[in-house]
Image (spheres, rainbow, N blue to C red):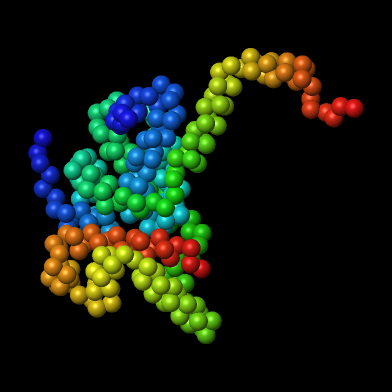
């Protein structure tokens, strides 16, 4: 099957082929979401902003001249929307952030909740694949440096950093539904 | 075109939000974006194409109705006249 490149998909979508635009979304949604999440630091908000990014992109299809890669174009839209979302959240805060809640957790009920949270995190860590779990545990629980972990596990430094990054994200995703 | 000199460690620091100094660079660098795209692969737990395409489809429908103007409304009216309003028949 012939995989159309991004420019072909943009051209088709501009001509009214909605499926082509759907393919563009599926191709770039992880990247857009990652770029937005890096800025807004809230998975739910990041999903909303990512959706808005693709809607803006769809409406702007006729203006895309192909001077840059489609991924770069989407990145710029996503980045600007993410910055706007952060500014809006600062101006109109609607909820307490988790760290604020944790700082206020002082009573027995909160302690019980904290224990439950600790157990949930333990379970989440256990569920990680071994190649992600080991570097994460060495980093977060034994507070080893990236370099020492690389030496211990006999892995390149970049591999260690990438795996710890992925492990943290996997944990965040696992804990997202925890209440 | 000059080759990108940003290291993978810098890119990961950027991805983790530790270092924003390459923000402007990433905006236009295909090499950095390709690295980040690979790093962020699988981050999203849901498929955004469905909700986005629903909105896009609705927008396209509304635009079509606006373009057709009275044409579509007249056809809906004609359909209602021919096929009825959906009342129960005895």
* Image quadrant assignment for residue A133: bottom left
Q: Is residue A80 visible?
A: no
| Residue B25 in the figure: left or right of residue A100 | left
The residue sitting at 20% across, 75% down in the picture is A144
Residue occupying the point 45% across, 29% down:
A18
| In front of the other: B27 or A153 | A153
Q: Quadrant of the C terminus of chain B?
A: top right
Which of these two is toward me, A169 or A59? A169
Residue extending farthest to the bottom is A108
Quadrant containing the N terminus of chain B in the rendered view: top left
The image shows residue A157, relative to residue A47, as above or below, that is: below
User: Which image quadrant is residue A118 in?
Assistant: bottom left
Determine the residue positioned at 24% across, 44% down.
Answer: B33
Q: Is residue A48 visible?
A: yes
The residue sitting at 44% across, 73% down in the picture is: A120
Residue B32 horizontal/vertical position (percent): 20, 46
Expressed as whole percent of the image width and height from the top left, the position of residue A101 reads 47, 72
Q: Measured along the vertical axis of the image, is residue B2 above or below residue A10? A: below
């Amino acid at each position: 099957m012939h995989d159309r490149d991004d420019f072909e998909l943009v051209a088709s979508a501009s001509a009214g082929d909605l499926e082509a635009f759907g393919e563009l979304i599926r191709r770039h949604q992880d990247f857009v979401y990652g770029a937005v999440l890096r800025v807004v630091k809230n998975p739910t908000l990041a999903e909303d902003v990512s959706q808005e990014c693709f809607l803006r992109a769809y409406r702007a299809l006729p203006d895309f001249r192909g001077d840059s890669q489609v991924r770069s174009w989407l990145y710029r839209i996503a980045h600007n929307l993410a910055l706007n979302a952060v500014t809006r959240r600062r101006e109109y805060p609607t909820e307490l952030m988790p760290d604020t809640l944790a700082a206020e957790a002082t009573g027995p009920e909160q302690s019980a909740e904290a224990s439950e949270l600790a157990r949930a995190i333990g379970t989440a860590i256990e569920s990680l694949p071994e190649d992600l779990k080991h570097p994460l545990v060495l980093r977060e629980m034994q507070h080893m440096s990236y370099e020492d972990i690389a030496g211990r596990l006999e892995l390149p430094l970049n591999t260690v950093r990438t795996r710890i990054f992925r492990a943290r994200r996997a944990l965040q995703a696992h804990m997202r539904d925890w209440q | 075109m000059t080759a990108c000199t940003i290291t993978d460690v810098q890119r990961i620091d950027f991805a983790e939000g530790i270092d924003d100094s390459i923000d402007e660079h990433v905006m236009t660098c295909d090499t950095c974006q390709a690295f980040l795209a690979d790093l962020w692969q699988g981050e999203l737990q849901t498929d955004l194409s469905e909700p986005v395409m629903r909105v896009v489809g609705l927008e396209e429908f509304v635009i079509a109705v606006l373009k057709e103007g009275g044409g579509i409304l007249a056809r809906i009216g004609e359909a209602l006249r021919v096929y009825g309003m959906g009342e129960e028949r005895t």
